[in-house]
Structure formats: structure tokens, C-alpha cells
Amino acid sequence: MDTHEYFMKMALDEAKKAEAMDEVPVGAVIVKDGIIISKAFNTRETDKDATCHAEMTAIKKACEILGGWRLIGCSMYVTLEPCLMCSGAILQSRIEKLYIGAMDPKTGAAGSVLNAFEDYWFHHKCEVYAGILQEECSNILKEFFRKKRAK
Amino acid sequence: MDTHEYFMKMALDEAKKAEAMDEVPVGAVIVKDGIIISKAFNTRETDKDATCHAEMTAIKKACEILGGWRLIGCSMYVTLEPCLMCSGAILQSRIEKLYIGAMDPKTGAAGSVLNAFEDYWFHHKCEVYAGILQEECSNILKEFFRKKRAK
């Protein structure tokens, strides 16, 4: 397991926490200099808050821990391609590298429905790498929705 | 002053609170059935949090007050065209109507740099109306940045 897979595995562990709470299983971690700064999972239903996606909560925690709104030198690992809101927050917070597990053809904003990370759009650049532990990240979601439909 | 101008005036009052704290002066209010549900202003510097734009905080407050993440029947009035993050959050929270004061040619995602509200993108539709008290909403920002440059 390489470094990227290691951190994505941590994000997957977060996604499992969401699953245990009957939330759509998405997890995110933010890393700086090889150290995990924050971890979070989707809590939209539990917190009754549309903004509580894993990425948003991870960003809020990282800002608090690092003491500023610019997450310079930080990378995010997220199990699912971020939506528009989360992609915007990743850019706003100046995260420098984004590692994605599974793509989201329905609402993903890092290349699927649109690409928020294309260089015409925002003054800050964030490099995007997709497909880290793709199968595991995709399977946890597929299984979640399969069980939902079977209910 | 019509109803839309009345609510935009309330958003402008929020922007003035941001200005008083040396924050980029942007304010937002969320309205349902003619009643203000939440009000907020940009606190990115004060809260040291990249996600603390006026719209995000107004959405979080409205979700808390209404007790759910879906802001059905709600309208948002915001003094400046929302960025990508906030446009995404407006769609995620199912806000139905968005009233904008001034447009933001640099990072606005409701028609300027891109249009997050175009119907190809997201299953939820939000109607967008721009130009409510445009001059006042624009002037408070221009004056803020003029003073910054003069320092």
C-alpha cells in the first residue's frame, strides 16, 4: 500500500463511520507534511445541515486546527468526487492537491458534470488525482444504496 | 421600496456588520413565507475559516432553525453573486429562489465566470434574479477595497 492508498484508506474508514449512522458513506481526510490534520465524514442527515458533507467538515476542522483559513501545503483525500459546493470550498481554502477515490457521474464537479478545477475559473490552482482505491470507494456506496433499495 | 428591495436592504445591513469587522462586506438573508429565517455576513477572517461566507452561515443557521437540511420554499437575498462553494450550497440546500445584488465578474458562479444554476447540472432548480439594489450592493464593496488600497 503506497502513501496515497494509506491516506485514502483513512478516508474510507471515515466513510464507514457515516455508513454506520445511515448516512451516505463518504469520508475525507486532510494531510499536511505527511500528517493527518483532520478527518470527517458526511453527517447531512444527523446534523440536519445541507453543508455537512465530509469535505466541508474536514476543511472547517483543518482551518480551526491550523489557525487560519488558508490550508497552504495541504492535500485532501476524499472517497467520492466532490460536488460543486465542496469543490468550491477546496478552492476557497487553497488546498493544493486533491486525491479522489470514486468518480460521481451524477453530481461530481471535478470532471464529471463539470470541472471546477480547470484553470480558467479560479486564481488558486489545485491538482486533482482520481482513482485512488477506486473499487473500495465505489463499493461502499454501491452497497449502501443496494441495501437502501432492498428495504 | 418593494419586497425584494426590503429584504436586500436587510442583507446590506448584514454586509455593513462585516465591513465594521474589516471583513469583505457581503451579507445574506434567507426568507420563507415573507419571514426572515436567518441573517449572516462574511466572517472568513474573524473565524479563520474558508467556509464562513455569508451564504454558508445563513444556510447553516436556516437548517438549524427549520430543523432539516432541505430549505424548501426558501429564498436567499445576497448582496454579491455567490462563488462556486456558495452556489453549490444553495443548490444542495434546495433554496428555491436566489436574489442577487451586485454581480462578481471575478469569481461569481451564477452567470459571471460560470453558471451553476443552469439546468443541465443539478436535479434541483433554483431561480436566479440579479440586480436588486445593485448600486448600493456594489458601492459598499468598491468603497471597502478603495479604503484597503489607500492604507
Image: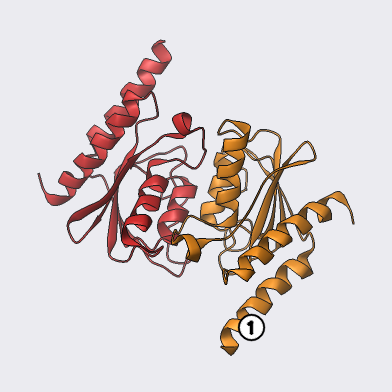
Chain colours: A orange, B red
Taking the image as shown, residue A4 lies to the left or right of residue A110, namely right
Taking the image as shown, residue A47 lies to the left or right of residue A82, namely left
Which residue occupies the extreme left position in the image?
B1
- Counting from the top left corner in percent of width and height, residue A32 is at 73, 38
Which residue occupies the extreme right position in the image?
A1
Dot 1 falls on a residue whose secondary structure is helix
Image: A99 above or below B49 = below
Q: Label 1, on which residue? A: A146
- Nearer to the camera, B94 or A150: A150
Image: A65 above or below B99 = above
Taking the image as shown, residue B1 lies to the left or right of residue B31, namely left
- Nearer to the camera, A55 or B121: A55
Identity of the residue drawn at 61% across and 48% down: A58
Quadrant containing the C terminus of chain B in the rendered view: top left
- Nearer to the camera, B116 or B44: B44
Q: Examine the rendering and report whether any part of residue B78 can be seen.
A: no
- Counting from the top left corner in percent of width and height, residue A65 is at 62, 36
Identity of the residue drawn at 67% across and 77% down: A142
Taking the image as shown, residue B2 lies to the left or right of residue B142, namely left
Quadrant containing the N terminus of chain B in the rendered view: top left
Which residue occupies the extreme bottom position in the image?
A150
- Chain ID of residue with mark 1: A
Give amino acid for label 1. Arg
Total marks in image: 1
- Counting from the top left corner in percent of width and height, residue A5 is at 82, 56
Q: Examine the rendering and report whether any part of residue A151 can be seen.
A: yes
Mark 1 Cα shell of 10 Å, populated few (<14), some (14-19), many (≥20): few
Image: B63 above or below B43 = below
- Counting from the top left corner in percent of width and height, residue B31 is at 24, 55
Identity of the residue drawn at 40% across and 56% down: B90
- Residue A31 falls in image quadrant: top right
Identity of the residue drawn at 34% across and 36% down: B26
